[in-house]
Image (cartoon, rainbow, N blue to C red):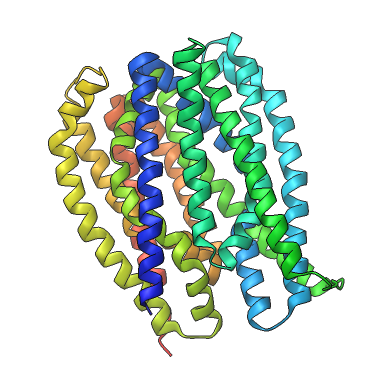
Amino acid sequence: MINKHFKINTLITYGANAIVMGSGFILMFIINRFAGVQTYGELALIVSTAGIIASLLTARSGEAVTRFFVREKTHGNMQNAKLIVLIGLSIDFVLGFFVFLFFYLLSNLIASKFLERPELAFSVWVYGFITLSTFIRGSMIGYFQSHEYFRVLNFIQILEAVLKVGFLLIAFFILKHPNINYIIYSYIMASFFVTLFIIFIFSTRFFKEFQGIKIDQNTELIKEYFSFNMKTFLSTTLKAGNNNIDNLILGYFTDTKTVGVYQVLKNILAPISFVATPFGMMTVSKLTKFYSQRHYKEFKNLIKTISFKIVQIALVISIILYLVLPYILDILKIENDNYEIVFFMLIIYTLLIVSVWWSRIFATIVNPMMSVYGGVYILIHNLLITTLLTYLFDLKGLILSIIIAYSVLCIYWIQNLLRIKNE
């Protein structure tokens, strides 16, 4: 189940994620040190708003393509496998165009209402290029995951992370523009070059694999794909909205500096999430095969084995990060306003998240409506409880609310896993 090949790929993926995480810390250091925590908060609000806008249209093509492509190829239906990828690509390009149009229409509103800086409207709009690039990549990434091209996927992550740092250094220290506009321009340049690379690699491999294979208009398969897409659309919209709404609620009731501090503290905890990150990509194909072949015992055991190890390592990392927090804040030139309590609360929240690292894959494979139900609960909780607690207790109220919400969600996912019967 966890063989030598799987372990080697996992180690390589950990190495890639370590580089990505390190690049993230460098970005956080540069922006906070030379542009200020308020600018970091502005960036967080733009990214969060972009995430919510994108979630309104995303089809989650990467996971949909992986699910159907693996199934059809396992059964030897190469015509169907090719059709799945082409459907996904078509959806990605069409929805990408619409999400970019959304950014154009809403840029003035976002800059004026959330950032309270109308002059940033153009930067908000051009940030849409990053979301457009993400949409275009969706099915291509799904194709790579289906073939377990983990080295390609890891290289893509590393390339984008390194390019972000490189372009930001140029913007800050050569062009001498340490501000939010040039941070966004740096991110756009990195996204643009990485997307071109992905298109090139995908094109060469896809056309080589399916050369001479014609597709049939399989109406039943198309209907099944779109039915699945509608379910994942609902769950993704809810998930993406829930993942980004905390910054918007906090920004509404406090200020961009508080949002910036919140993002810094969350990013300091990135090593905890780092422990779980590789396994989503590493296990999606394997878990899909187990479930489609009705090997339910192996399906559950793989999730349980990995989860146990993740939580053990995450606990050790949490203790270390808590002890070094004051030194990190000092390096970033952020005044420590008794943030230890807030940080401890965020540790609890992060541990809850990583303990159910498998939930999204599980729902995609077993029943996408599970994510919808969970997402509806989190949305209602955020709109009612999180808003109220943030209004009453600011940052601490926000974090307390999400701890409560995700404790309930963890119980929900574990119950669903235990319902899978062994065969």
Residue nearer the viewer, 237 or 206 = 206
Residue beneath the point at 75% across and 46% down: 93
Q: Residue 115 placed where, x, y %?
A: 51, 16
- The answer to whether 400 is drawn above or below residue 298 in the figure is above
Q: Quadrant of residue 88?
A: bottom right
The furthest residue to the bottom: 423
Residue nearer the viewer, 241 or 79 = 79
Would you say 344 lies left or right of 406 here? Answer: left
Q: Is residue 223 visible?
A: no
The furthest residue to the left: 323
Residue beneath the point at 72% across and 71% down: 81
Residue beneath the point at 47% across and 55% down: 374
Q: Quadrant of residue 182?
A: top right
- The answer to whether 2 is drawn above or below residue 54 in the figure is below
- The answer to whether 392 is drawn above or below residue 16 in the figure is above
> If the image is split into quadrants, where does the N terminus sit?
bottom left
Q: Residue 397 placed where, x, y %?
A: 29, 32
Q: Residue 188 placed where, x, y %?
A: 60, 29
Q: Is residue 191 visible?
A: yes
Q: Residue 64 placed where, x, y %?
A: 63, 62
Residue beneath the point at 57% across and 51% down: 236
> If the image is split into quadrants, where does the C terminus sit?
bottom left
